[in-house]
Image: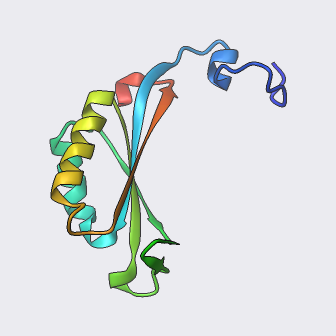
Amino acid sequence: MNPTDTSDPRPIAAQAGLPTHAKTMLMLITEATLERRLVADVQRLGALGYTVSDVRGGGQFGVREGLWEADRSIELKVVCDADVAQRIAAYVCEQYAPHYGLSLFMVDVAVLRPHKY
């Protein structure tokens, strides 16, 4: 396997013969003040784990540089089954989107250890 050969469209793990399993990654970018509530919600709604990172960025409503507490943003990532991702996204859109700055993304991913997700 040549890592620079892009002619094979399969994921690198599949090219190497490793078994992969389909999951969905839900990414939420929002105000840091929501972290504890969102973590509790995603766990209650079926996520087995999550990752949170501090992030900065800008968009339609300005720039969030994170220079002071009320200006901080987080990215929360959850890898899970598609139905769990849909359930979390629907809840977050209903409960948080009308009141907070929020972006959501869903991406199909291939994982190597499905029991973790």
Q: Residue at x 25, y 54 (%)?
A: 39
Which residue is at the front of the view, 48 or 70?
70
Q: Residue furthest bottom?
A: 68
Quadrant assignment, res 34: bottom left
In-image side of 60 versus 96 (left or right):
right
Q: Residue at x 40, y 23 (%)?
A: 114
Image location of residue 78, percent across then percent down = 36, 43
Compared with 113, 74 (above or below) is below
Which residue is at the front of the view, 58 or 12?
58
Image location of residue 54, percent across then percent down = 45, 67
Compared with 52, 72 (above or below) is below
In-image side of 43 versus 4 (left or right):
left
Q: Residue at x 21, y 36 (%)?
A: 46
Compared with 75, 3 (above or below) is above
The C terminus appears in which quarter of the rendering?
Answer: top left
The N terminus appears in which quarter of the rendering?
Answer: top right
Compared with 85, 102 (above or below) is below
Q: How many marks?
A: 0
Image location of residue 35, percent across then percent down = 28, 63
Quadrant assignment, res 19: top right
Indicate the colouring scheme. Answer: rainbow
Which residue is at the front of the view, 16 or 71?
71
In-image side of 15 versus 54 (left or right):
right
Image location of residue 100, percent across then percent down = 26, 69
